[in-house]
Image (tube, rainbow, N blue to C red):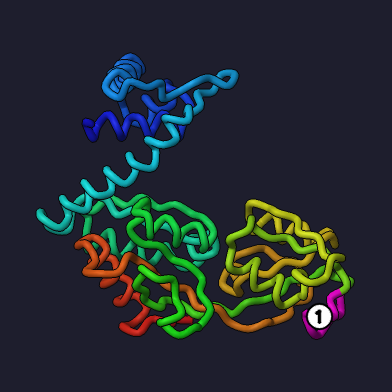
Amino acid sequence: MDPTSLAIFLAVASQGSVTRAAAQLGRAPSNVTTRMQQLEAELGVTLFGRAGKRMRLTCAGERLQGYAQRLLALSDEARQVVGGAAGTLRLGTMESTAASRLPGVLAAFHQACPQIRLEVRTGPSQALQAQVLDGRLDAAFVALDPIPLDEAEPGLARQPAWRESLVLLLPAHEDAVHPESVRTRSLAAFAPGCAYRALAERALGATINPAWRIQEMGSYHAMIAAVAAGACVTLLPQSVLDLSPVPASLPRLPIGDSVTHLVWRTGEPVPAVQRFIEALQAHTGPSGLRG
């Protein structure tokens, strides 16, 4: 299978449209269509069906998607190992890290390694670790409890980067001095797999108290707005609060720290990951844990 055809296949799968995939790739739509027809003929299966105006993967297409991602990742890794630090670094990060911590590191990395193209994707810690393990990402910033190394996710090496002070943001009518005494029994949080959501549920007792409701939201701005309206409480790093317009009337309840780590697959990191680790250490210090 031709790597270019696999890359086009993944673009169509992601965009759900030949036209949008062609625009993303800088190709003519007819070229994208021809490539997909050739790939289907080579494999002897139909890769896409339609759901309304959107193209959807068939069962065969869903099976191919994971293999295509891994094949392209291995191809890029081979180019880096054989040809030196070049190619693409696929970096995952939590939303909070992308907003408050990452810009300075990315600027330093780009200046030191302009030949390496960066792809940055955001997501919850659990999903990011899984994507590093299966090769869809080269490295990722995730939130981990300060647990011993032998209890960490098997198959992942890690470098501590930042210690985050975590804060429960409460509605103006709250006067709680401990998490367990919070009266507003609704938590605004990201989807399951978010480390900060798990920490908040644990601190508030939301996992054992059926009175608690979880309001899933897609951004910290939405969570802060829900708290300001008196509807929810939320947990977020102080570094995000420092960048956000938060009404002074909203109480803040510190609940401890969490450590953000850079994780990558165990073994000798490929050159692009090694260069990024060096840029991170130059920014945070060799041992990390910059506040």
x, y (%) of residue 208? 79, 72
36 sits left or right of 114 in the view: right
Vertical arrangement, residue 58 with respect to residue 126, above or below: above
**Judging from the image, what secondary structure is the residue with disc 1 in?**
helix
Q: Amino acid at mark 1?
A: Glu
Name the residue nearer the viewer: 253 or 196: 196
Magenta residues (range)? 174-182
* Residue 92: in magenta span: no
* Residue 178: in magenta span: yes
Residue that label 1 marks: 180
Using the rendered view, name the quadrant where residue 133 is placed: bottom left
170 sits left or right of 163 in the view: right
Tell me if residue 258 can be seen.
yes
x, y (%) of residue 188? 73, 60
x, y (%) of residue 46? 41, 21
Using the rendered view, name the quadrant where residue 114 is placed: bottom left
Tell me if residue 99 can be seen.
no
Q: What residue do we see at 65% from left, 66% from top?
A: 197
Decide whether the magenta segment is chiefly helix, strand or loop. loop
Q: What residue do we see at 33% from left, 72% from top?
A: 280
Name the residue nearer the viewer: 241 or 197: 197
Q: What residue do we see at 71% from left, 70% from top?
A: 201
x, y (%) of residue 71? 27, 43
The residue carrying pointer 1 sits among few (fewer than 14), some (14 to 19) or many (20 or more) residues within 10 Å by Cα, namely: few
Q: Quadrant of the N terminus?
A: top left
